[in-house]
């Protein structure tokens, strides 16, 4: 890289005074080495930094080895190209290149963290600074931009932050489970103990009808507690055992049919019709076990609240890069407040749902967790007396990594000022 600015014709001053430009110093081998070449070699040796200059027409007129490494343009491919070539289409439409240069002129430098474009069209995240270059007389004769690729380092930082967030979530999750075990399981167990104590102490005097009633109540309570424990174990499995999450491209149609098979008997008993309106070969990128669990939890809830002779249907539609699944029933529905709180993990709402629906509150939290683990979202629309529609989205393909944040590193120490 040789830094040679294209100056206006009326300006005879050079960026480096002649007495310095023409001077030399002795190398170890006693050879004369020009100072100008020395500075050019210094800039060219900074291979982790893209350093290039722009003339007053905003054309690139020098390009170091680091710029070639980062942007993939060879020097002969990029020289005389407009400065905008390295910016995204969105930034060009928003006037970011001109704004960057204007800021450098007004403030002495412009610092910007943003996405840039390589020769092959791929994007990378970089932190860059632009400085105006002035002649000895103070005239602006161009700009120098120094840029560093932060993509990998920021993804490392993001991974660490994600690990911390996951750890905090697991701690909170542990506290929720302990609270549920304490409040929502212990009390029913205490009641069951009371029933068994009564049966043991009054066995000889209890009438057969009363005995049968207590036994039926005890049997139902045991089944409810087992159902609740199953929900808790499944929820803990998803949260704590990451290796069970194995997403792949799957057809959701057979998973709907499996879920229907599970509930066909209870649906038929209540004369509820199950309709699979999803087309075969509707492909999503998800974990099959979790998807089946989602269908089963929502279907169980829909059948429980459907009226005799009702219909529970499952359909889907494409939205951008997702498939949205709709599970609709024409049952009793729920209030706006209940719908808004359905996926909020509050202990009091779980206890309430538990009493009314034998674990539905935990089931909905499990469903939300499964959908979000697979990169989707879940929401509900309902009104009292008019049924409920559950919606959840799943990606068609493996989700891309999220955009990364900013780094406010400063390269001022690399530029001689004054």
Image: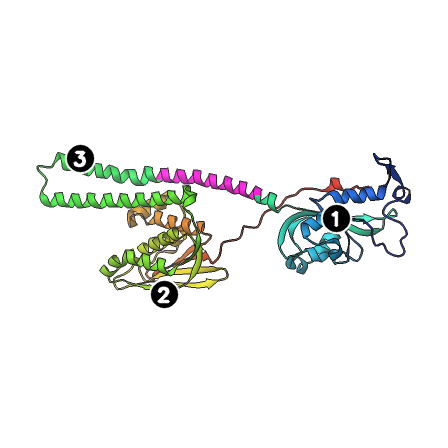
Q: Quadrant of residue 261?
A: bottom left
In this view, the mark in front (1 or 2): 1
Q: Which residue is mark 3?
A: 197
Picture quarter containing residue 30? top right
* Image position, residue 368 (x, y; %): 41, 50
Cα–Cα span, label 1 and label 2: 60 Å
Q: Is residue 304 left or right of residue 51?
A: left
Dividing the picture into quadrants, the one containing residue 153 is top right
Q: Which residue is mark 2?
A: 277
Report whether 374 appears left or right of 160.
left
- In the rendered image of this protein, does residue 404 appear above or below residue 179? below
User: Of the residues under marks 2 and 3, which one precedes in the sequence?
Assistant: 3
- Residue at the spot x=26%, y=40% of the render? 188
Does 2 appear in magenta?
Answer: no
Residue at x 77% of width, y 42% of height: 42
Residue drawn at x 28%, y 38% is: 187
Query: Majority secondary structure of the magenta segment?
Result: helix
Q: Which residue is mark 1?
A: 64
Query: Where does the magenta region start and end?
Result: 156-179
N-terminal label among 1 and 2: 1
């Amino acid at each position: 890289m040789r830094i040679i600015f294209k100056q206006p014709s009326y300006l005879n001053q050079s960026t480096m005074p002649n007495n310095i430009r023409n001077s030399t110093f002795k190398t170890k081998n006693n050879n004369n080495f020009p100072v100008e070449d020395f500075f050019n070699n210094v800039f060219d040796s900074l291979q982790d930094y893209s350093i290039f200059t722009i003339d007053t027409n905003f054309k690139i007129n020098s390009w170091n080895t680091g710029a070639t490494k980062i942007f993939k343009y060879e020097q002969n491919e990029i020289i005389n190209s407009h400065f905008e070539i390295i910016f995204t289409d969105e930034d060009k439409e928003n006037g970011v290149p001109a704004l960057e240069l204007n800021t450098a002129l007004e403030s002495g430098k412009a610092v910007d963290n943003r996405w840039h474009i390589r020769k092959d069209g791929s994007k990378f995240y970089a932190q860059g600074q632009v400085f105006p270059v002035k002649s000895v007389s103070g005239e602006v004769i161009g700009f120098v931009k120094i840029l560093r690729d932060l993509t990998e380092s920021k993804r490392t930082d993001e991974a660490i932050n994600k690990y911390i967030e996951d750890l905090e979530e697991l701690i909170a999750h542990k506290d929720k489970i302990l609270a549920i075990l304490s409040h929502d399981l212990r009390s029913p167990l205490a009641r069951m103990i009371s029933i068994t104590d009564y049966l043991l102490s009054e066995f000889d005097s209890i009438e057969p009808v009363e005995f049968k009633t207590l036994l039926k109540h005890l049997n139902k309570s045991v089944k409810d507690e087992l159902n609740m424990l199953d929900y808790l174990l499944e929820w803990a499995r998803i949260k704590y055992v990451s290796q069970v999450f194995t997403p792949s491209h799957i057809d959701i149609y057979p998973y709907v049919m499996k879920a229907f098979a599970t509930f066909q008997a209870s649906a038929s008993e209540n004369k509820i019709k199950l309709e699979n309106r999803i087309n075969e070969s509707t492909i999503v990128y998800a974990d099959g076990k979790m998807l089946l669990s989602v269908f089963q939890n929502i279907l169980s809830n829909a059948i429980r609240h459907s009226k005799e002779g009702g219909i529970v249907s499952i359909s889907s539609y494409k939205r951008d890069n997702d498939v949205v699944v709709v599970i609709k029933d024409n049952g009793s529905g729920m209030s706006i407040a209940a719908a808004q709180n359905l996926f909020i993990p509050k202990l009091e709402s779980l206890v309430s749902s538990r009493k009314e629906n034998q674990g539905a509150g935990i089931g909905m939290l499990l469903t939300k967790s499964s959908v979000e683990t697979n990169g989707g979202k879940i929401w509900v629309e309902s009104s009292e007396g008019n049924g409920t529609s559950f919606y959840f989205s799943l990606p068609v393909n493996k989700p891309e990594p999220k955009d990364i944040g900013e780094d406010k590193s400063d390269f001022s120490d690399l530029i001689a000022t004054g």
